[in-house]
Amino acid sequence: MTADPTHSNRLAKRTLLLAAAAMGFAQTVLFAILAPLGREVGLVEVQIGAIISSSSLTLFLVSPLWGRASDNWGRRRILLIGLFGYSLGTVMFAGVFQAALLGFLIPVTALTLLIVTRVANAIVMAAVAPSANAYMADITTVADRIKGMGAIGAATNIGSILGPAIGGLLASISLLTPLYFSVFLTLAAAVLTLYALPELPKKTVISKPLKLKYTDPRILPLVIAGVFLFMGFAIVQQTIAFRFQDVLGLDGTQTAKIVGLSLMFSAAAALFVQLLVIPRLHVRPFVLLRISMPIMMIAFVIMALSETQMLYIISMCILGLGMGLAGPGFMAGASVAVSSEEQGAVAGIAGACGPLGFTVGPLLGTYLYSINGALPYWFAFTCYLLLFFFTLKFSDKK
């Protein structure tokens, strides 16, 4: 008796969404606690930014390889490597922080080991996004692609909502407790994937497809837009904790709590867009990018000018609304631009745009922050203004 393909697809989507939610939780918790944790062990802003930048550069270099590997080895196998590897790597990363907090490591040694463990973690973590997105592309039609990518984005944002909410409570125990709890969730997602995610039948390839390049004219405009999109977002995400701590005069635990709260509201705003707005919009993917730019520019202006907790949280909500539109638009635009045989490759390239933006953004943002606390947000505003005019010039193909 053959399995019902509709039931299998439903089970696969649920498993993918739960895995995406677990990763969203883990990533949001890290960004909420990394800045105060770094300062606790004696690191300065640029050094803390270097931790994220080094791992993001690794993701940029490795994501396309995992995307192509998912074409050859299967989406499920690559996803499992990513989830189990992320869990193990995060334990190692947290262990270095724990040793530094206990006084066993001087700051320069802690920084070196944090970068090494984070890069090692990123090598396997890079397998998650391209395999999950390619799997979703395999089980959705072209017409439903935006909804499928939007669902992954929505699941990630659900995790991003729960992450700061639960992480803020766990930070009262210690700043590292949220990180250890995130390991439990990603490991649970890995076990669920192992037992619940169906293996897709391998497609028969008549001829070996050409290697997809970043400069492929079908996806080049989206690649450029994606890198700048995520660079601006990375600047905010890496500096907002410093902004909260310095302007509002908070300690490390208080900073983790308020940053977690702001990230929670930002993710909730993005989730609102992805669940209630995008399904009702019948526009092409590149149009979603175009609509999102002015929304996020407003958020940057508020971040640069305001000095109150409420205005910072409002700006993060506005930023979430914009990213809720931009993320699915970017991923779906890349997916529909290429053939079905290139879904793993394009998912790897699209997945690498975020890490490239996060390679430049944290270092640039923390450097600008060391000059002036408002400068990173004015710079992000300028980048998005240029990006908006770029999206007016280029339009995605049907």
Image (cartoon, rainbow, N blue to C red):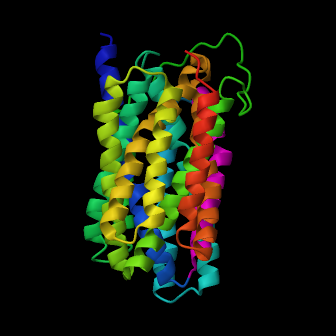
284 or 255: nearer the viewer:
284
On screen, 118 above or below 334?
below
Residue at left 63%, top 27%? 394
In the figure, residue 144 lies in which quadrant? top left
Which residue is the extreme one toward the bottom?
103
Q: Which of 275 and 158 is in front in this view?
A: 275
- Left or right for 45, reference 86: right
Q: Is residue 166 visible?
A: yes
Q: Which residues are drawn in magenta?
A: 43-72
Q: Residue at x 41, y 69 (%)?
A: 33
Q: Where is residue 94 in the image (x, y as percent from the top left)?
A: 46, 70
Q: Is residue 298 rendered to the left or right of residue 381?
A: left
Estimate the x, y position of residue 90 in percent, counting from the top left: 47, 62
Q: Is residue 332 magenta?
A: no
Q: In which quadrant of the rendered view does residue 44 lie? A: bottom right
Above or below, 31 against 343 in this view is below
Q: Is the magenta stretch mostly helix, strand or loop?
A: helix
* Placement of 104 over or under 132, stated as above or below: below
Q: Which of 297 and 191 is in front in this view?
A: 297
Q: Is residue 52 magenta?
A: yes
